[in-house]
Image (spheres, helix red, strand yellow):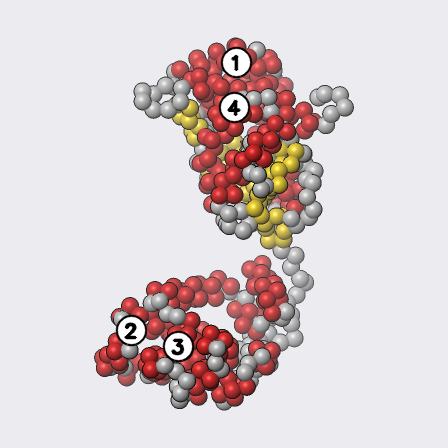
Amino acid sequence: MIAGMEQWETVDAGWGRLAADFATFSEPSNVREYLSLHRAVGLEAGDSVLDLACGAGLALELASLRGADVAGIDASPRLVAIARDRNPDGDLRVGDMNHLPWPEASFDVVTSFRGVWATTPDALTEALRVLRPGGRFAMTVWGHIKASPGAWSLAPFALAAAPTVSNQAAMNQMGRPGVGERLLVEAGFADVERISIPFAWEFADPEAYARALASTGPAYEAIGEVGAEEFHRRCVELASERVREGLPLRAEIDVAGFTARRRLDLPESYDDAFTGSFLSAYPPNETAEQMRREDLDDDGYVSTVTKLWARMPGAFDQLFALQRSAAAFGGLSLRHRGVLTTATAATLGDSACAYAWGGKLAGWAEDPQVPASVLRGDDEALTAQERVLARWARQVVGDPNSTTETDLEALRAAGFDDDQIFAATLFVVLRLAFSTFNDALGLRLDRAVVEALPAVVRDAVTWGRESV
Ligand SMILES: C[S@@+](CC[C@H](N)C(=O)[O-])C[C@H]1O[C@@H](n2cnc3c(N)ncnc32)[C@H](O)[C@@H]1O
């Protein structure tokens, strides 16, 4: 340790001295690791991501190509200079990952690629702090190196002095079964999972390998012991035994990955005075809390539909994903969907969907008479084509066994092909499932939705359960 300097400030001597070599000879071989971890953590366009010990910033450049807003920190100013060059719009900082210079809850995602070690648990606590509640974390660490086919490629690091080599071993503990999991749980992470990560270094020839390896931090320590020439000679000698005619040198190394999450700050209880249905208040769970927050952000209150369906949030998402697919498959316009849904709700006598979709259709049609006429059943304000569609929805809901081929002919004559008839029917039936479920369990729509409706729509709903 250099007098007057913190440990992290000495890192650049090793990691920064051949920064351009590291960025171009070593880092690109890690792309398999970067891509698979980004996928595992569900990195999406619009996510803000922080990479700890970001090196020369190639992982962040890939994240940015996915549409993420990127930030990174590394102790080596010379590596950060390259990371900035690669990520001109990113927030790249020189600093210590154990004391992050960002406020609490700054990021959707935090990653680290073999940057956090068993000897640096504070970095995990810091990662958790800067993640927003519910935010995602993913990291990689070296796995079982000795059992890896590419173990030879890391062997020259053992040329370092004995205490350094044993420190490297201590740093690598996180990949051992259960160790990474325990450290993440102790740091306060939830949903900790170990995942497998593909990792293979490739080099054009022994010289390229020697140059790549020499650019890393552990090599600096080995070079300090045996000298640069000897280190290079040993690397070339080792790699020469691995040359394959016409193929690059390849070193597959076991790398472990972890994904985890920061918990949401769950309220003590969801025991709202009224649950919106005959069922009791839904049990606290994090997905439900997410739905609740989205409602609060969008509408300022938690809808009764959310209160009912938050009990099993996945069911709601899956049902509507299928309904959206059906609509997309048939190329059904928003107006088509509105006509089908309001006709379905009116036939079933479901006031909740009638109000909710009456309001939507009034907006899409820019005329409240359109939904009002479907809800009344006279279809006065519909086009000829929409009337056929509304009639079909009423038949499907009212008495599916009485439909005939002639009904399909009417749909075809109105311009719908068989794919569209398939899609419209599936769309109606899925809505029927949703409405039937809600009605059977006593769902009543929030008064706020009903009060915001045009009077003509409100007045057309003369059946079903009252709003609350
Ligand atoms: C194994 S490299 C990984 C680099 C990069 N993540 C990659 O995928 O190539 C370790 C990195 O940790 C950085 N580092 C070491 N100690 C650090 C600390 N306390 N804070 C931030 N970065 C640190 C080094 O500068 C180096 O870039």
Q: What amino acid type is highlighted by mark number 2?
A: Phe
Q: Where is residue 187 in the image (x, y as percent from the top left)?
A: 65, 43
Q: What amino acid type is highlighted by mark number 1?
A: Phe
- Give the label, 3 or 4, closer to the camera: 4
Spatial CA distance of label 4 from label 2 is: 62 Å
* Label 4 Cα neighbours within 10 Å, binned few <14 / some 14-19 / many ≥20: some
Q: Earlier in the sequence, mark 3 or mark 2?
A: 3
**Do the residues bearing badges 3 and 2 touch, measured as CB atoms within 8 Å?**
no
* Label 2 Cα neighbours within 10 Å, binned few <14 / some 14-19 / many ≥20: many
Element carrying mark 4: helix
- Which residue corresponds to mark 4? 21
Q: Earlier in the sequence, mark 3 or mark 4?
A: 4
Element carrying mark 1: helix
- Which residue corresponds to mark 1? 231
Q: What amino acid type is highlighted by mark number 4?
A: Asp
- Which residue corresponds to mark 3? 340
Vertical placement of residue 295 versus 441, above or below: above
- Which residue corresponds to mark 2? 416
